[in-house]
């Protein structure tokens, strides 16, 4: 799924009447990307809000992602194709909870998923199911996915939610329902130290259907506190629960709901 959220959740982009200071002045587009990713990597954690729409399908997600732990909460819009659910991960264990629609979406083809609706399911390191989710490196994977590719260009300094940024435009290949699509990507980077990413906007066009996926970043370096559920169902106790290889499960990590 990709997106359109207009002014809700995307952040209103306002042009400044005067030229604001730019601590990234003189750097090339690739240097701005390298600076932003390096600064972000040094923080070790982030908060992200994603809104996505492709045609009539809308999905939203909120996540706190650290190097060894994190959480992602996903909710669908009116179409409800992905349902509502939460993924938590701690060292060597991952937990999933969601409604029947969410579980059916990520455990494609499983006849056991709906029976686990609204229960926490635990996947331990070493199990086939855990390796399919593989969220151990979610933070690094998230940062890698932010970088536009191909021909890069710098936009003018502007303001996003009160933060002065410079946009780096490029391209990226995204996967939606197994189909590889080209996307136009703009990464907005703060023009003041430590020059971390502020937002990522990804525009996709599939025939007559278009979509936009927007991620907003904040709380870089804030501790990510995750508490394991008091009660959970071991995934090994549920026959046929393993997620399908290459299905929605793997694409829930590091965070990009557009790929679900």
Image (cartoon, rainbow, N blue to C red):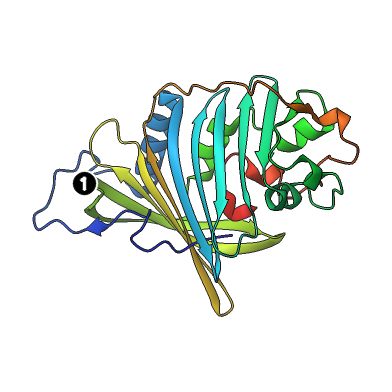
Residue 47 lies in quadrant: top left
Residue at x-position 18% and y-position 59%: 15
Figure quadrant of the N terminus: bottom right
Left or right: 210, with 178 as reference point: left
Residue at x-position 58% and y-position 50%: 257
Disc 1, SS? loop
Residue at x-position 51% and y-position 31%: 65
Residue 157, position as x, y percentages in the image: 22, 52
In the rendered image, the residue lying farthest to the right is: 239
Please say if 213 is above or below 236: below
Please say if 194 is above or below 15: above
Left or right: 142, with 234 as reference point: left
Residue 185, position as x, y percentages in the image: 45, 57
As rendered, which of 149 and 53 lies closer to the eye? 53
Which residue has dot 1 on it?
Answer: 162
Number of labels in the image equals: 1
Residue 250, position as x, y percentages in the image: 70, 43
As rendered, which of 31 and 64 lies closer to the eye? 64
Please say if 135 is above or below 126: below
């Amino acid at each position: 799924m990709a997106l359109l959220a207009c002014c809700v959740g995307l952040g209103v982009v306002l042009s400044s009447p005067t030229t604001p200071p730019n601590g990234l002045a003189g750097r090339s587009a690739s240097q701005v990307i390298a600076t932003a990713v390096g600064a972000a990597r040094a923080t070790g954690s982030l908060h992200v809000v994603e809104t996505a729409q492709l045609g009539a399908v809308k999905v939203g997600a909120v996540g706190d992602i650290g190097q060894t732990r994190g959480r992602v909460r996903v909710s669908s819009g009116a179409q409800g194709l992905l349902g509502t659910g939460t993924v938590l991960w701690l060292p060597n264990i991952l937990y999933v909870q969601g409604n029947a629609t969410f579980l059916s979406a990520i455990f494609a083809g499983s006849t056991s998923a709906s029976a686990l609706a609204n229960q926490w399911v635990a996947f331990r390191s070493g199990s086939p199911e855990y390796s399919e989710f593989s969220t151990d490196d979610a933070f690094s994977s998230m940062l890698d996915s932010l970088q536009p590719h191909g021909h890069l260009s710098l936009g003018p300094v502007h303001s996003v939610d009160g933060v002065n940024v410079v946009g780096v435009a490029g391209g990226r290949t995204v996967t939606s329902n197994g189909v590889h699509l080209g996307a136009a990507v703009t990464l907005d980077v703060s023009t003041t130290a430590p020059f971390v990413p502020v937002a990522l906007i990804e525009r996709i066009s599939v025939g007559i259907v278009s979509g936009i996926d927007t991620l907003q970043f904040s709380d870089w370096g804030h501790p990510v506190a995750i508490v394991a559920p008091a009660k959970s169902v071991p995934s090994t106790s549920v026959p046929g629960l393993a997620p399908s290889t290459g299905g929605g499960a793997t694409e829930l990590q590091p965070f990009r709901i557009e790929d679900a």
